[in-house]
Amino acid sequence: MKKRRIAELTQKIIAGYRVRREDDRSIFMDAPLEELQEGAHRLQQQFCGNHIDLCTIVNGRSGRCGENCKYCAQAACHKTGVETYSFLPQEEIIAHAKANQDAGANRFSIVTSGGALSGEEFEKALDTYRAMRKSLTIDLCASHGLLTRSQLRRLREAGVTSYHHNIETSERYFPQICTTHTYADRIRTIKAAQAEGMCVCSGGIIGMGETWEDRFDMAFALQELGIESIPINSLMAIPGTALEHLAPLSGEDILRTVAIFRFINPTANIRLGAGRKLLPENGATAFLSGASASITGNMLTTSGTTIAQDMELLKELGLTNRDEDCSVHTGSCAAR
């Protein structure tokens, strides 16, 4: 009976229905994981075909962050021994981007620590994006914190098409994770980026002590914002951070979360982020049960998977990193 309910819901979503906050959520928690994954895979195939979008990042400015996000190794309030440096030289960033482009990545982002990139370093970032737009073909993304709308406009003019800004968790739980800025601050930044014509990549971290209701709330918030790319990071508790004591999530827990996010956000790219090593076969199962994208290469402060390894994995699974498949099926970031 439950399997039929999952199958019926899957078909309704394919036909145009969207799961809402007021709907009965018990179906997602009561259903066997395998059946939920089967439905999520059908939705993934319908809306993203065989495409897996691969993005890469470079840590453009590291450490000394004045925010107090409990999970972050780069927060100045934590003693993690993370490397600290100012904005990287342009030639170094472009070399990273070209290497990732040549290896097969679809998009590249500069990520910087701190509440917001500003002043001379923001100008350096703009110059770097302009140079990459002229010399490379890889899609350009950016992640520079709580920027103003005018800053976001300048990024768009410099060639950036996607802005990354996580909501991190539910609105209810956010104050338990960060108090130096608010959930509303993040929402304002996301809406400003969208108003400037950017695709927004926004998701969060699971395994920070939140409840399943918090995860549902985050998924619905992203749906209501019209987010096109949703990274799901699983906490890799870093010694020296406020969450260092938390145990890692089980692979089954992560896979159920990925599938639920696919049901609630069927047309978005559900993107695997940090914590892929916690998944069976380094995420292979997830790519066949809801996940249509991944951050690849090295994470900011946790080890990820190399592009070459991911390219081989996709080949083994009969999937592709080419973006024409998803552009046929959906208006997500992969089509840009």
Image: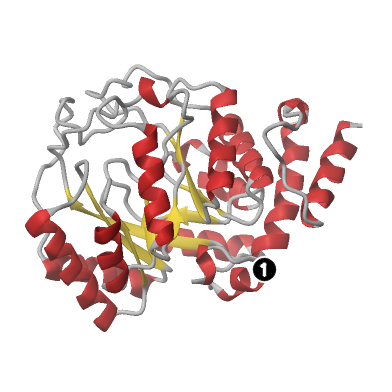
* Residue drawn 67% across the image and 68% down it: 329
> Counting other residues with Cα less than 10 Å from the Cα at mark 1, is it few (<14), some (14-19), or many (20 or more)?
some
* Residue drawn 18% across the image and 51% down it: 117
* Residue drawn 55% across the image and 52% down it: 226
Q: Position of residue 262 (x, y in %)?
A: 64, 46
Secondary structure, mark 1, is helix
Single out the residue that lies furthest toward the bottom: 134
Quadrant of the rendered image containing residue 76: top left
Single out the residue that lies furthest toward the right: 1
Tell me: residue 74, above or below residue 282. Answer: above
Evaluate whether residue 305 shows in this view.
no
In the image, 95 versus 111, the foreground residue is 111
Tell me: residue 131, above or below residue 272. Answer: below
* Residue drawn 47% across the image and 54% down it: 294
Quadrant of the rendered image containing residue 22: top right
Left or right, 57 with reference to 322: left
Left or right, 301 with reference to 227: left
Q: Position of residue 100 (x, y in %)?
A: 33, 68
Q: Position of residue 297 (x, y in %)?
A: 35, 56
In the image, 182 versus 244, the foreground residue is 182
Q: Amino acid at mark 1?
A: His
In the image, 245 versus 230, the foreground residue is 230
Left or right, 163 with reference to 334: left
Q: Quadrant of the N terminus?
A: top right
Q: Pointer 1: what residue?
A: 329
Evaluate whether residue 185 shows in this view.
yes
